[in-house]
Image: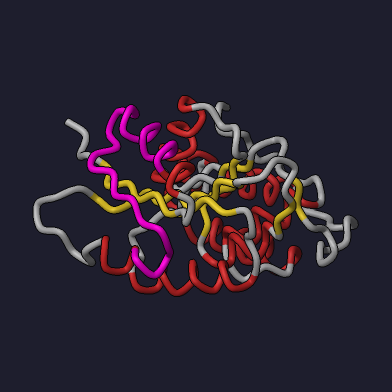
Amino acid sequence: MTAPRLTVVAHPLPMFRAGIVAACERLEGCDPVIAAATLAEIGTAVPPHTPGAAVTDALCVCSTELDDPVFSGIATLTERRPGLRILLILSAANARIDVSAAMAAGAAGVIEAGVSAEDLGAAITAAGAGRITLAPGVSWDLDDAPGAGIALTRRERQVLELMGRGLGNRAIAAQLFISENTVRNHVRRVHEKLDARTRTEAVIRAARVGLLEISGPSD
């Protein structure tokens, strides 16, 4: 039996928050669902260690303004509660977001305000599995995107694709029939070529220059 997933929904507007909470409560495995008005409240709403209870791995943060203060709050929260996997749900249609900043802060995906309950569930499941979800309609700022002339070898592209699926070095090695040490070398070179410090940042930067496609919630 799969352990229930503790899900937290944070948004200052009661009606919007209630709608996402209701959607989460209908999803299989999202139990219990906790509502909070602000990111600061989550630190006390979510116990750091709950003996015998669910893994804390899903947090939906809904915001019209996803900017530096919000990202700073998310980064602080993920430091205090490292088990959280944060999904950002845009409260406004056609919103723009600095995806790199969101991922650097600890987000596992960005989905649109009009997301269906089915796609919300898929995004939460993907976050729990370590995969990144970006809805097709999400716009992102490209001002600081790296140059498009990045040359990856065939093997580096294979490793990058598997990184994008959330696989670790051991799983990648098994998929490609190579050693973990070889995988580590490929990952290091991918990081260097994409000027990325983390796997998530490498995946996001690769997607922004067309080297990798990140799926939407329902894929």
Residue at image x 58%, y 58%?
200
Q: Nearer the viewer, residue 193 or 41?
A: 41
Q: Is residue 90 left or right of residue 167?
A: right
Task: Residue 185: tell me if it is visible.
Answer: no
Q: Nearer the viewer, residue 139 or 176?
A: 139
User: Residue furthest toward the left?
Assistant: 52
Q: Is residue 191 left or right of residue 209?
A: left
In the rendered image, the quadrant that contains the N terminus is: top left
On whether residue 91 falls in the magenta region, the answer is no
Residue at image x 73%, y 69%?
195
**What percent of the width, then of the height, locates residue 105?**
55, 67
90 shown above or below 42: above
**What percent of the width, then of the height, locates residue 113?**
60, 39
Residue at image x 67%, y 68%?
196
On whether residue 33 falls in the magenta region, the answer is yes
Magenta range:
18-41
Residue at image x 33%, y 60%?
83
Q: Nearer the viewer, residue 107 or 149?
A: 107
215 shown above or below 158: above
In the rendered image, the quadrant that contains the C terminus is: top right
Marks counted in the figure total 0
**What percent of the width, then of the height, locates residue 177?**
51, 42
**What percent of the width, then of the height, locates residue 109?**
56, 48
How does the figure colour the protein chain or chains? secondary structure
Q: Nearer the viewer, residue 141 or 219?
A: 141
Task: Residue 30: tell me if it is visible.
Answer: yes
